[in-house]
Image (tube, grey):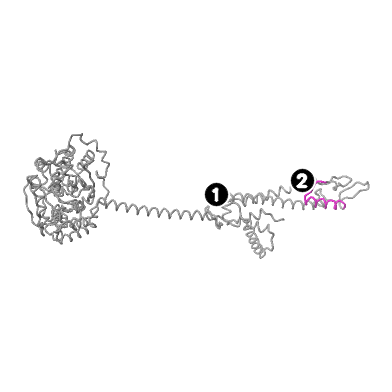
Amino acid sequence: MADNPQKRDLFAELSEMSVREVESQLPGATERYIEETEGSGQRSWKNSIRTISQRKPARTQEAPDVSEDTTEMLPAEKEYEKKESAAVKENVAADDRGVVVQKKDPAGSGLSALEMELLGVTGNYAEEETAADSSLDLERELLSVRAESSRAEGKDVHPDPDAISLEFEKNKKSASESSSETKGPESDEDTFYADITVPKTEPKGPVNEPLKGERYDPMEEELERKEKRDRLIRIILFSALMLVAGILMTYVTFIRDPGKGGSASSKAASSGSTAKSESAASGTASAESGTASTSSVPAETVEDISTEDLSAYLAEMPAEGDEIVSTADAVYTYEQMVKDLYFLTTRYPDIISANIAATTLDGRAVYEVLIGNPEGSMHVVVQYGMRGNEYITSLLAMRQLEYYCEERTAGNVYRNHNYKEIFADVCIHVLPMVNPDGVSVCQFGMDALRTKAARDSVKACYEYDKAAGLTKQPLESYLLTFGANASGVDISKNFPAGWSKYTGGAVQPSFEGYKGPSAGSEPETQAVMNAADDRTKGVVIYRATGNLIYWDYGSEGTVHEDAEHLAESLSTRSGYPLTALPKYDSTDAGGCADYFIEAGIPAVSVVVGEGTSPVDISAFPDIWTANLNILPMLANLYTNG
């Protein structure tokens, strides 16, 4: 039988498939092929009988003239006609009457020997043609199924003719050699059908098991490369994003809690010619504390009013003409201070501004308020609320700021000098609540603390103070006198001046007296130190209680003279008497005034109220009367002497 190209194509495709895959994708194909072949053979036999019956010459006196048939015949038909013409002469004879008769019928079938022979030839040929047609049908079905499977996998359904041809020859040769060893030589057709015969074995995998030996697909490799490239790009972008986020967080931390105590100390020291050698050492200790202080920055995320959109509180702002800062209650909270600062800067935007100088352990802001000319050549620092239980001074600070705004807006004068004139070259830095965590603990106890770090720290202070005999009070009463920050550090003992020699306080976190892990370690301490620079002419520290002014601190030379002039001016304005304090020693050091005196900047402490802290609100009217004009007095002091 002649070679069929379609068979060769099919063979090349099927040579890539394992027997298991053919079974899994074409279940029942072999059985269907056998049934169709047997059916086709029966149909071919019947058609052959029908054809011979139609072609059998009539029993007439004369043989049919086959030469007159001009119809184009198939090769088998031509062979039939040729043999029939030759055999007619042998199988027919004339009787006595001249009638043509047929020779004997050996099988008794009614057919001559020639017909029987031709019937065999025609039957064999029909069977071969029917089998070929059936095999072609099977081939087309296999190709169709293979194409559908390839399309589902996104592959090329058109095989490579050259590759198919080579594979066909290779398999043909292999099959031929294998057959010659057992059965002898076989035809290409036998080899082909031997290759696609499915053995009677059970499939070992799922029906949809991937085909083995699939040819190289460049599109699939390109997709894999693209996926790897995209994954690498995503990793790079994520790393870059994390790096940028880290830089931004560092920048924000530096702005809100810069930790530049060492640099501020060195600047301030350069302005005083009588600074002691220990001042340089203090500056170094302060610089080292910048690293330690980062532990004071809250690691936990808390919601604080300082980070909110304060415009939401405008509905609470008093009407124009009414006072913003209320003095009805001495419990002046951190939250109320933040709101009042926003109201003041909203009502008087041209003469007052505020910024955040540091952030505490419990997430609160240490505010710095500027009045006057920030570009002026003379600066003064005034700070309040350094100890938690002295929050009466924070109320005083806010009321002084509002009074300044009212007087300047009204065009009033101080000692015959209007506010615009006396503040033209002076800027006052007001820190109204240096220790907001300590203030909140004194006012509301443990409920005021938002972070676990702050709560654990304050509880540890209480346990230590009880064990050391520093308190016998229950926790609630103990917290009412809490002067330290949330870390248990007394800010008034954390400044660099004499810090390393100070041994007079608690040796670990406590409600008061603990100097901290290092000089200037606390963000609250750094906020005060950073408020001063080489333009600073004086520092005023508001404390409670005593109704007096502390000064001297062992100062000498020009600093002593300037400090005395400052103290006397404050005494004249407030009516508080002066009290000189000696230089610090091992029992009392690390103070704010000591630090600035050593840095060459005059510093005094104004102590307000009587009794013990916290001071009752009933004492505020006297405090206010003595201190209402302190801010303009300071500006006028450095402007007009």
Label 1 sits on residue:
152
Binning the other alpha carbons within 10 Å of mark 1 as few (below 14), some (14 to 19) or many (20 upward) gives few
Q: Is 292 or 340 nearer to us in this picture?
A: 340
24 drawn magenta: no
Residue 569 location in percent, x, y? Answer: 9, 47
Q: Position of residue 209 (x, y in %)?
A: 53, 53
Give amino acid for label 2: Arg
Q: At x 58% / y 54%, what residue is drawn?
A: 22
Question: Residue 83 lies in magenta, yes or no?
Answer: yes
Q: Estimate the x, y position of residue 246 in percent, counting from the top left.
A: 32, 53
State which quarter of the image contains the N terminus.
bottom right
Which of the pair 81/580 is nearer the observer? Answer: 580
* Residue at 9%, 44% in the rendered image: 574
Q: Secondary structure at mark 2?
A: helix
Marks counted in the figure total 2
Contact between labelled residues 1 and 2, with CB atoms less than 8 Å apart: no
Q: Which residue lies under the disc numbered 2?
A: 50
The part of the chain drawn in magenta is 70-89
The first of marks 2 and 1 along the sequence is 2
Extreme residue toward the right, this view: 96
Is 67 left or right of 515, judged from the image as shown?
A: right
